Image (cartoon, rainbow, N blue to C red):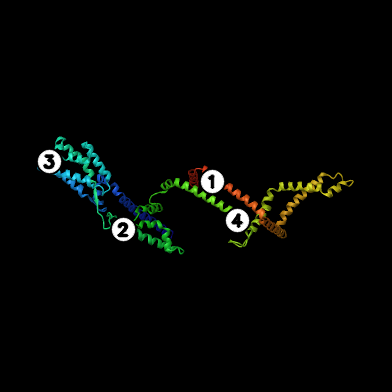
Amino acid sequence: MQGKLTDNSIQRSWWQKLLALIALINLVLVLFNLSYLSLRDFYFNNAPILIRIYDPVKAIEPHPDTEAYLDTVARLQQAIARSSLTSDSTEQLLASLRQQSIFLIEENPFTASNKLGTFAKLKHRMEYRLQARSTKEAFNRFWSREYLAQADTARELEFFNQKIEPLLKVNYYRHIDANGIESDRFWRIDLFFVIFFALEYFSRTFQIARNQAKLSWWNAMLRYWYDALMLIFIGRWLRIVPVTVRIHKSGLFNLEEILRQITHEPAAYISQRVSTFLIVRLLNQSQEIISDGTLVNVLLSSNEGIEVGETDKIDKIIDRLISLTIYHVLPQVQPDLENLLRYSLKGALQESDIYQTVEKIPGFTDIPQETIEQLSDYLARATYDVLLDSYTDAQGKIIFNRFSQNFSDTLKQQIQTKATYNEIANLLSDLLEEWKLNYVKNSRQRNPEQTLAEAEQIKTDLT
C-alpha cells in the first residue's frame, strides 16, 4: 500500500513537472512573439532563418516600395557590369533611382513599420557621405553619372551595399485585417496551449471540488484564479504569474533563492508597514473599548455576548489565582510573610490595652520580651498554616469561595462607579497611547531589512 502511494506521488510529481515545462514553453513563445518586432532587425542580421519562419506568423512582407528600390539598384549594378556608366540603360536606371529616392523621402515607407529611427539614420548617412544640405540633394547627386564617374563607382556602390541597403532591407509591410488592425496569426499557435490548459484547469478544479465537500467548483476555480491567466489571449504576458507558480510548486527549477532575493526588500518594508498598522489598529481599538465602556461590560457582565463553554471565566480565573497564591506563591515567600506577620502582631500586642494593663500590675512589669516574640512567631506560623489548611478543607473552600465572590462583586461595583472607571480608563488609555507612540518611534529607528534578515536566520537555525 505504501509503495503504491509512493508510485502515485512520483507520477503526480512528474506530471506537475511536465505541465510546468509545457507552460514554460508557452511563455517563451509568448515573450518571443511580443518582442519579435522590436528585435526583428537583430534576427534579420544574425538569425535570418527566424525571419523566414516567423514573418508569415506576424503577416510581415518586404515593403514593396523599398523592394522596388533595391531591385532597381541591383539592375543598375548589373548594367554597369555589362556595359558602362555611359550606356543609355544605365542613364535610365539612374534617372529612375533619382525619382524613386524623392518618392521614398516624401512618402517615408518606414512609417508603416514604425522605423522612423532607421529612416533618420539612412538620411543622415547619405547627407554626411555627400556633404549635402538635404537628403534629396544627396540622393540626386549620388545617383548621377557625373558623381559616380568622378568618385569611383565601385567604392560608392560598395558604400550603398554596406551602409544603405541593410537599412532598406529591414523595412517591412504588415497586412491589415477588416477591422483596421495589423494581422497577427500567433493565436493559431497559442490556441493549442489554451485548449490544453483549459482542459487541465477545469478538470483539476472539478476534482478538487469533488474531494472537498464544502468547496464548490466555482469557488475552486476562484481559488486557483491565476491559472485562468493561461486561457486569455489579451495580456498574454500575465502568464508569467501562473508559470512561475507552476515551476515553483512542481520543483522543475529551484526558484526559492530567486524569489527570496526579488521579494526581500519589498517584503521587509511591507511587513514593517503592516505590523505597524496592526499594532496601532489594535491599540486604537483597545482605547475605544476602554473609552466607551465595552471593557467593563465584557469583564463584569457574564450574560452578554458570545460565550465559549459554560464556565464563568472571571470566577475561574480568580479561583486559579487564589490556588496559585496559596500553593505556589506563599511557600516561596513564607519567610518574608512570617516576618511581616511577626512584626505586625508584635506591634499590635505591645500597643494593646491588655498588654498595657498587665504591664501596670505589680509583679508583671518585667514581662520578658521573649514571651511576646514567641507569641508573635507562633501566631505568624499559625496564620500561614491555617490559611493553607482552610483552603484545602471543604468547609474552608466554601468560605474562601464566598470571600472571593463577595470580593469580586464588591470590586465590580466599585469599578462601575463613574469616577473610578473614568480614572482607570484615562490611565489605561494614556498607557496605550504611550505604547503606540513608542512603538512607532522605535519602528522608524529599526531597519526592516535587518529585521527580516534576523527572521530568516532564525528560520535557518531552526531547520
Mark 3 lies on a secondary structure that is: helix
Question: Which residue in the protein does label 2 denote?
Answer: 191
Query: First in sequence: mark 1 or mark 3?
Result: 3
Q: Amino acid at mark 1?
A: Val
Amino acid at pointer 3: Ala
Q: State how far apart marks 4 and 1 are (Cα).
A: 25 Å
Q: Given contact means CB atoms under 8 Å apart, are the residues at marks 4 and 2 in contact?
A: no
Marks 4/3: CA–CA distance: 102 Å
User: What is the C-alpha distance between the residues marked 2 and 1?
Assistant: 53 Å
Q: Position of residue 368 (x, y in %)?
A: 83, 44
Q: Position of residue 460 (x, y in %)?
A: 48, 46
Q: Label 1, on which residue? A: 440
Secondary structure beneath label 1: helix
Q: Is residue 119 visible?
A: yes
Tell me whether the residue at label 4 lies in contact with that at label 3, contact meaning CB atoms closer than 8 angstroms.
Answer: no
| Contact check, label 4 and label 1, Cβ < 8 Å | no
Identify the residue at horizontal 33%, vertical 58% (top origin): 194
Indicate which disc residue 410 carries. none
Q: Is residue 169 left or right of residue 30?
A: left
Report which residue position mark 4 lands on.
292
Farthest residue in the right direction?
362
Alpha-carbon span between mark 1 and mark 3 = 85 Å
Kindly identify which residue carries mark 3.
Answer: 81
Q: Seen in the image, is 451 located left or right of residue 180?
A: right
The image position of residue 352, as x and y in percent, is 82, 49
Q: Nearer the viewer, mark 4 or mark 3?
A: 4
The 10 Å Cα crowd at callout 1, few under 14, some 14 to 19, many 20 or more, is: some
